[in-house]
């Protein structure tokens, strides 16, 4: 298959139309099972996070997290070069990919060079971005997910609905039925039984896989160390048992100092699942050395850009790249909790998805993402690295109507939602506000004829009452009070 | 131009101009100066809250305790390192006692005995490079003598921890041991047995790694 054919075919097959946000949201809201599954899970995660930070000076810790990430971004190109140099010295091979397609081809080429037919995967959102599984399958390489949630989602031929808990949209009964249909286990609501069966099935796969593919949580430039955060041990299996390990990561995951990971880890696990720490924090700095008895003989890192260097150009949008992928913003999002992760139709759902995905799919395709929010601010309040998510949503809303003179639009697909009528109304509005006499006349006429105001204003009044003008304008009332 | 050079060039020629790096003050991670006993209590409480098991014992008593623990689990085989003093002590102990399981020594590359490791080993015992009280974590730096899979594949992982090697925080441990000077092939923090909550947030242990983590604390 030619390179170009891959680009188009692997995107068309699995592609969900991001633009169809509203029909999916409507369907999800009317699905009591989805509502119940998400509500229960998100309530649990919110209270666990809260208790995990008890006794901490959380604001100062979040400041530290934000500063560590900003310090890393401030010297990003130098750190990437340092990381490359350190990893190479340690015996790890470094690859660079401009986009998901190039990253997929790099992974394929490594597999082909080793004559690898089967890959076992640890959890990686970047590999979801790349649509790696689907691509490898097309190339005749089996790619099996080993994180239990990802395994369930893969068996169901779905995509993750949450970045930390991929199968959170399903309940035990649904999973039991799925495992029964696909792997022949008995129907059971005993989670231990279901887990034990998955362990048996996947252990065979770990033993026989030719390649292990993982993500990366933090990449440390000073020591050339890849850090993986997990509870199950599938990440350790993936990076230790197969003879070759390929780690895929976004270029923004690099931090300068090993010390930096202590604070980021403290923030990540508590924000994500309310754990003081995960079961495993796995730090990999080298392939198997000559005298060692296990571990992969080859380790590769694929540094994936996929739009990140474009986000990097703008001072405000840059904050998006601080993200450490904890998922706290979605756990606390009133919209996400009600519509669920699949409604967004994007790799990353919820608030972080709404500010990240428009850069990957463009504001034309992702036009509904920045507006799928009530701007309540919860996401920004819980973000462990203080990304001003609500501000970035507003910025992207401006971008989608082409910004203004002060804030010219920069994001791909900008102006996709621009309407000539709306632009004219706002122009008139600003023209009138710049003329005090006209403004007073307008508002007092409005107050006088308020009975003529329409009671219904399109979609706005579907669930709300229309706002009514006051009988007297503010200017009139102030005058009466003699001020 | 290669993707590498194109990416680096784009990052270097940032349209927003140069960025300034903020100061990072790590003092928020500091904890009071706990005594060894306080650290041990904290460690025990924290690791037990995530299903780890702690047994306080002594230099002379740990083998007896280990034998009891393994017998109660019906373990038939125990994987040990070839050179480490833990393995040496167990090997000489089996010469005059019957209550220890059969000892298997990890002295061959994994390729030659992978199936046996996955299917025939009931427990593995490793040393630690200390522990972390605040998070209830063990520090493991696998070596050629104590390979990586010893603490991962067998259903029971037993870790030996010296009480005086407990640090208060991860930051403490890393700074005191000067990790930044050079990292091993693989370093780990292990905080409990393998677990998952991916099925409706219900906890289940031993999904891929050990189902049980037993810590022998030498006081």
Image: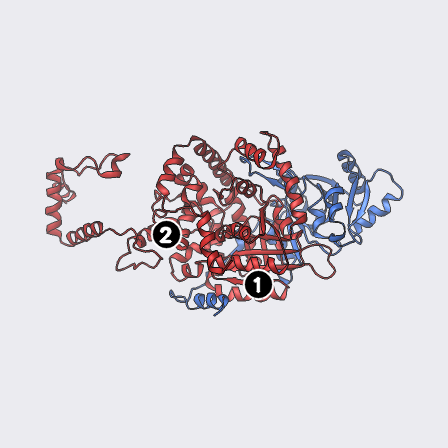
- Residue A398 lies, with reference to residue B66, above or below; the image says below
Are the residues under badges 2 and 1 in a single subunit?
A: yes
Question: Can you tell which chain is drawn blue?
Answer: B
Q: Is residue B146 something one can see in this rendering?
A: no
Mark 2 burial class by Cα count in 10 Å: few <14, some 14-19, many 20+: many
- CB under 8 Å between discs 2 and 1: no
Residue drawn at (70%, 61%), measured in percent from left and top?
Answer: A289
For disc 2, the chain is A
In terms of depth relative to the viewer, which is nearer, B46 or A339? Answer: A339
Q: Secondary structure at mark 1?
A: strand
Name the spot of residue B111 as percent of width and height, x first.
73, 53
Q: Secondary structure at mark 2?
A: helix
Q: How many marks?
A: 2
Q: Which residue is mark 1?
A: A94
In terms of depth relative to the viewer, which is nearer, B158 or A369? Answer: A369
Which image quadrant is residue B75 in? top right
- Residue B75 lies, with reference to residue B21, above or below; the image says above
- Residue A88 lies, with reference to residue A67, above or below; the image says below
Badge 2 or badge 1: first in the primary sequence: 1
Q: Is residue A186 something one can see in this rendering?
A: yes
Which residue lies most toward the right here?
Answer: B96
Name the spot of residue A442 as percent of width and height, x first.
12, 46
Marking on residue A392? 2
In terms of depth relative to the viewer, which is nearer, B51 or A481? Answer: B51
Quadrant of the snapshot with the C terminus of chain A: top left
What hue does chain A carry in this figure? red
- Disc number lying in front (2 or 1): 1
Name the spot of residue B92 as percent of width and height, x first.
86, 47
């Amino acid at each position: 298959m030619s390179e170009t054919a891959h680009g188009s075919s692997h995107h068309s097959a699995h592609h969900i139309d991001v633009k169809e946000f509203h029909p999916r949201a409507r369907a999800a809201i009317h699905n009591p099972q989805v509502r119940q599954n998400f509500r229960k899970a998100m309530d649990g995660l919110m209270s666990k996070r809260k208790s995990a930070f008890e006794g901490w000076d959380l604001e100062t810790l979040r400041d530290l997290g934000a500063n560590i990430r900003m310090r890393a971004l401030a010297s990003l190109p130098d750190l990437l070069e340092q990381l490359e140099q350190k990893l190479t010295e340690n015996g790890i091979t470094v690859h660079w990919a401009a986009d998901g397609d190039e990253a997929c081809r790099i992974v394929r080429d490594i597999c082909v060079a080793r004559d690898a037919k089967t890959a076992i995967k640890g959890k990686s959102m970047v590999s979801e971005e790349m649509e790696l599984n689907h691509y490898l399958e097309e190339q005749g390489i089996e790619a099996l997910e080993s994180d239990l949630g990802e395994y369930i989602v893969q068996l169901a031929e779905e995509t993750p609905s949450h970045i930390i808990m991929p199968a959170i949209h399903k309940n035990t009964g649904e999973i039991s039925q799925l495992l029964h249909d696909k792997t022949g286990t008995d129907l059971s609501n005993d989670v231990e039984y279901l887990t034990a069966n998955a362990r048996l099935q996947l252990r065979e796969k770990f033993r026989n896989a030719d390649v292990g593919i993982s993500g990366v949580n933090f990449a440390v430039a000073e020591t050339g160390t890849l850090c993986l955060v997990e509870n199950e041990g599938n990440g350790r299996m993936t990076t230790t048992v197969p003879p070759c390990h390929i780690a895929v990561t976004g270029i923004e995951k690099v931090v300068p100092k090993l010390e930096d990971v202590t604070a980021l880890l403290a923030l990540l696990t508590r924000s994500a699942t309310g754990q003081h720490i995960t079961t495993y924090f796995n730090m990999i700095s080298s392939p198997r050395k000559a005298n060692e008895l296990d571990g992969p003989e080859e380790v590769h890192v694929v540094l994936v850009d996929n739009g990140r260097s474009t986000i990097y150009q703008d001072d405000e949008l840059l904050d998006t790249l601080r993200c450490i992928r904890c998922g706290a913003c979605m756990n606390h999002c009133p919209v996400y909790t009600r519509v669920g992760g699949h409604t967004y139709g994007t790799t990353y759902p919820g608030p972080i998805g709404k500010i990240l995905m428009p850069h990957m799919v463009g504001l034309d395709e992702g036009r509904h993402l920045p507006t799928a929010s009530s701007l309540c601010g919860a996401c920004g309040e819980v973000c462990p690295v203080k990304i001003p998510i609500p501000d970035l949503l507003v910025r992207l809303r401006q971008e989608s109507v082409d910004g203004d003179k002060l804030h010219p639009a920069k994001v791909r697909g900008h102006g996709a939602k621009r309407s000539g009528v709306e632009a004219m109304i706002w122009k008139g509005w600003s023209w009138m506000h710049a003329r005090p006499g006209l403004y007073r006349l307008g508002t007092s006429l409005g107050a006088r004829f308020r009975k003529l105001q329409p009671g219904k204003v399109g979609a706005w009044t579907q669930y709300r009452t229309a706002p009514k003008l006051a009988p007297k304008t503010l200017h009139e009332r102030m005058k009466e009070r003699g001020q | 131009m290669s993707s590498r050079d194109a990416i680096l060039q784009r990052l270097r020629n940032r349209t927003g101009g140069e960025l300034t790096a903020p100061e990072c003050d790590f003092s928020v991670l500091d904890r009071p100066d706990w005594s060894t006993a306080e650290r041990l209590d904290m460690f025990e409480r924290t690791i037990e809250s995530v299903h780890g098991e702690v047994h306080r014992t002594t230099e002379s008593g740990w083998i007896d305790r280990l034998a009891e623990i393994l017998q109660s689990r019906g373990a038939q085989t125990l994987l040990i390192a070839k050179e480490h003093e833990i393995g040496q002590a167990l090997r000489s102990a089996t010469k005059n006692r019957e209550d220890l399981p059969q000892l298997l020594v990890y002295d061959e590359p994994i390729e030659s005995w992978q199936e046996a490791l996955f299917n025939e080993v009931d427990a593995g015992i490793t040393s630690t490079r200390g522990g972390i009280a605040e998070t209830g974590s063990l520090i493991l730096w696998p070596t050629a003598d104590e390979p990586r899979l010893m603490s991962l594949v067998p259903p029971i992982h037993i870790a030996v921890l010296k009480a005086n090697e407990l640090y208060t925080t991860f930051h403490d441990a890393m700074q005191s041991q000067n990790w930044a000077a050079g990292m091993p092939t693989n370093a780990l923090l292990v905080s409990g047995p393998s677990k998952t909550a991916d099925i409706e947030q219900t906890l289940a242990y031993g999904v891929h790694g050990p189902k049980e983590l037993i810590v022998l604390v030498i006081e």
